Image (cartoon, grey):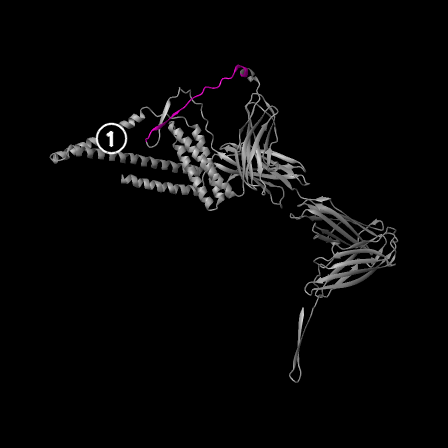
Amino acid sequence: NYNISITSQDNTGVAGDVNGSFKIHAKMLIGFLPGSTKYYQGSTGSLYYAATDSEDNALSGANVTIKIKDSSGNLTYLQTFSTGSSGQILPTPTFLLPNDAKVGQYNISAYTTYYDAIADKILNATNNASFSLQSGSSGGGGGLAAYVDTAVVWYPDNVMRFEMWFSYAGNVTDPDNMTLFVYDPASNLYFNISLTNANRSSAGLYNYRYAMPINTASGYYFAILTASKEGFVSQMVKPFRVAKGGPYDVKLTVLPPLEVSRQDYLSFEVLVENMGEVTQDVYIDYWTSYENNTYYYSGEAILTPVGVNITIIRTAYIFSNQPLGMNTLNLKVTYDSVQAPILLSANFEVVDDYINIPPPPPQPPPPDYDYESGGGGGGVIERIIYLPPEELPETDAAGIGKRSSIEIESYNKEINIVRGWTSLESVKVKNTGNTTLKNITLLLSGIPSSWFKITPKYYESLTSGNSTIFLIEFKIPNNAESGTYNIVFTASSIERTTEKVGRLIIFTSIEELVNQEIINLKIDVEKLEEDTDYSERLGRNISQIRDIIASARAQIKLAEDNAKKKVFDDALLNTQTASGLIKRGKRLLESLVTEEPSVSQKPTRNVWLMGLEALLIIILIAAIALWTIRSRGKLKWENIKAYLKKKTEKSATNEELKKELVAEKEKIARMTKLLESELKEGIITQNAYNELKKRNDEKRAKIEQQIKKI
């Protein structure tokens, strides 16, 4: 857009201004002509079109309507095209001239419209051309025919092969000119050749090989072969496809048990289904990891036929130095050198070996135990009563030969999950009868069936005394309503049915989940401490459990601190660590054997204490006597007794205080040692260890100062 300003002034000094504007648009230069000026009946013609401006810049996006009329003015061809980035119409337009086409002069017109965005103007142009159509050639064959063939499907990283042959007047012959254009699924030019690039096998027979790049796109391609000879032009279009392996459906499932001990094997299942159209090998790599460290690693290649799902079961060894706690099983499936591999992962827990608890020895009739309450003010009497096993009536005993029974042995009574999350739970079902159960299933009611999936659907049989596990994968939608849902687990067989109730609590955010976990952990640790106190009153050695309780409370405190800081991932890790510690404490508590206090221990300690007190009294009496003699009896006996009593009480009080402080110091040392063990085993993080050790060091320093003062 150009602006013009004209200013003029006459001889009297009067001036005037005039403003105007004009636009300069592109000057279209159209190249339009047929492939030949002479055609024969039964041949195929082609048209060349290109649009540029006066500076030879391509005009892309121009709309072109091409018409062909025969010698009588009848319309025989009408098509509309758009120019590409080169300003040309690609692929080259072609038209067929039937064997009975009217001979004579044919007129071709191309009507072009182009929008010039700079000048904001629509440009139009009409171009004309012509060719003559003659009757079939004297050879009687009806002109030139070109043929091209290739495979229906090609695969990347292979070599394409194109076969081309030509006939003229019914005889195989070499063309004067030939071009082969191949276009990809986006209609972009993939490659092109001319007659000089093709390999001539014999007269009229040619071939060409093309090495496909590794990044070749999959989809529908088409090849256009155009040939000419002595005014005849022939063209053929050949479509074909490029296909790749995949896509693939892959599923990774950790097989029960989900808790694995060290120096044991983790079993898992991999399902790979080839959803593509190529049978091929896929490469599977799997490994276990904890944080950034990799432990077990293995891999293999498996053949995946089209439309077939392949299921393999593999095991991963859990090394003796693998950290305790939540570990990760990783899976990588590689099926293409260009496409990214499929990556999956699943969690499992590495736990300590469970302690085998020996059966308790026969118990004598229990005595009554008296326990003094704190503060020395009275006591509470607790009696342990041993009940004999219930004897079955004769009628029941007679019918015990065949008894069917099923029981839900273990399950998570309260499942906490955030909306949009996925959680995997297990339900253990046991055959508690003495007959084999058939067709064992597990049903879950109380929530929509689309929220969960139970694997497997059923077990064919379960022998007496054995257990089996059902896995429930919960997938809570993002729009699910938060709150508590009462759910019912129903285990059934053909013979029996049993039910257990539970709760599914859906939270709107991870913050709500962490806060609820902290509340639950506080309740659990209080219950563990109550059970520990009871065991201590029975005479059991619970010092290690006390240390575990202290570590669990410290983890709960760290979880609360991280929740306040909005670091919910760390807070969730703290709650998981605390939960593991509480479980460990419960297992240790169950495994403890009552340690009855030795009969000679308490008297021995009392004798030493009494001897120490007697020695102090003798020393004090001797000192008082000596002082009395020197003071020549000025001190009354009543004053001596009062002084002696005061010194004795003070000495005993200091001695007891010192023992308490030393015991507390030893407890802190044990706790520090336990923290070091938990850090090595991966139960707690380095940050948690540093924070807890710092607190213990501060407590120990204060205790040492108090001991020095005594």
Q: Quadrant of residue 58?
A: bottom right
Q: Is residue 163 left or right of residue 530?
A: right
Q: Is residue 247 left or right of residue 374?
A: right
The one nearer the camera, 136 or 419, is 419
Q: Position of residue 85 (x, y in %)?
A: 70, 58
Magenta span of residues: 376-396
Q: Is residue 324 above or below residue 27?
A: above
Q: Position of residue 573 (x, y in %)?
A: 48, 41
Q: Is residue 539 above or below residue 125?
A: above
Q: What secondary structure is found at the residue carrying circle 1?
A: helix
Q: Position of residue 48 (x, y in %)?
A: 77, 58
Residue at (76% x, 51% y) in the render: 225
Q: Is residue 324 left or right of residue 629?
A: right
Classify the position of the C terminus by image quarter: top left
Name the amino acid type tagged 1. Answer: Leu
Q: Is residue 173 above or below residue 467?
A: below
Q: Position of residue 112 (x, y in %)?
A: 76, 61
Residue 581 visible in image: no
The one nearer the camera, 348 or 179, is 348
- The total number of labels drawn is 1
Residue found at the very far left of the displayed protein: 632
Q: Quadrant of residue 602?
A: top left
The one nearer the camera, 127 or 217, is 127
- Report which residue position mark 1 lands on: 612
Q: Is residue 286 magenta?
A: no
The one nearer the camera, 698 or 515, is 515
Residue at (60% x, 35% y) in the render: 453
Q: Is residue 395 magenta?
A: yes
